[in-house]
Amino acid sequence: MPESVPVRCPVCRRAHVCTAPSYPCACGAPTAVRLDGAAGPAVLAHRAWDEEWVTVRCAACGRGNQWPHPELGCPCGTVLRLAVSDAPPAALPGPEPAAPPPAPAPASTPAPARRGPFRPVTIRTARDTVTATALYLRWLGYRGIRRADQRPPSGIGLAAHGLVAQVDPAMRPAAPRDVECLWLNAMTESAACAYFTLAGYDEDARACADTLGVPLFVLDLTGTPAPVNGPGRALAEAGAA
């Protein structure tokens, strides 16, 4: 288990005990940021995308992964960015060894790579919605996930190699215009696309997505995306091409 460290809010002086969340590396091993208990937290006054992420090297395979910088919301209303240690993270207990994969079928098309179970992050804020989507895209096999260059009309745009995704944390169903704008943006980038939302889609938006072949996903508050149309189910099953 990741170690816990004491944190004191510099505004109200309230004491907390914090544990950094763990995330799955591409190799399947859980990784966690090592918090620096000796350094005090910083009050988060504004956000910058480049400062939202921290690189964590997996103790099992040595891969460098980018995970959200750990934060804490104090009951006084202050958001604290926790200090991170430069020391490498300790290895965390991994999942039970999986059964050996079955022998490949004698087919001309190779079978898709096996993926372990998706480990979501609980959604409490709009930022968590983006984090959950980025983790899911990485689980599907997409790499180089970053903020999209073009900002969508609503929500937040994410981009990866070969994919443009829109994340909409608004509490209103997505409309056909939202789906069409994402599709047009993907066409200009010569990329595939996918739409993720908390509030779902109205009937016209679903019909539009089916016509254009846009995968639709709805996130629940556990941070788990569920496909809600045919292209979405196909993407969830096949993963990144």
Image (tube, grey):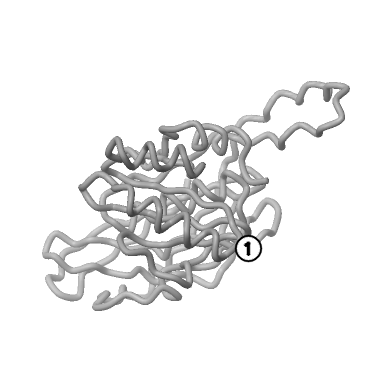
- Judged from the image, the secondary structure of the residue bearing numbered disc 1 is strand
Q: How many marks?
A: 1
Depth order, front residue of 8/201? 201
Left or right: 84 as drawn, with respect to 98: left
Q: Which kind of residue does numbered mark 1 sit on?
A: Gly
Depth order, front residue of 110/206? 206
Disc 1 designates what residue? Answer: 64
Dividing the picture into quarters, in which one does residue 59 lie?
Answer: bottom right
In the image, residue 127 above or below residue 137: below
In the image, residue 61 above or below residue 238: below
User: Image point 48% across, 72% down: which residue?
Assistant: 149
Mark 1 residue crowding within 10 angstroms, few (<14) / some (14–19) / many (20+): some
User: Image point 40% across, 38% down: which residue?
Assistant: 224
Depth order, front residue of 55/137? 137
In the image, residue 117 above or below residue 124: above
Dividing the picture into quarters, in which one does residue 156 lie?
Answer: bottom left
Left or right: 91 as drawn, with respect to 123: right
Depth order, front residue of 49/67? 49
User: Image point 61% across, 61% down: which residue?
Assistant: 190
Left or right: 36 as drawn, with respect to 176: right
Residue 189 lies, in percent from the top left, at 57, 65
Residue 148 lies, in percent from the top left, at 47, 67
User: Image point 50% across, 46% down: which residue?
Assistant: 136
Residue 67 lies, in percent from the top left, at 49, 60
Residue 183 lies, in percent from the top left, at 47, 54
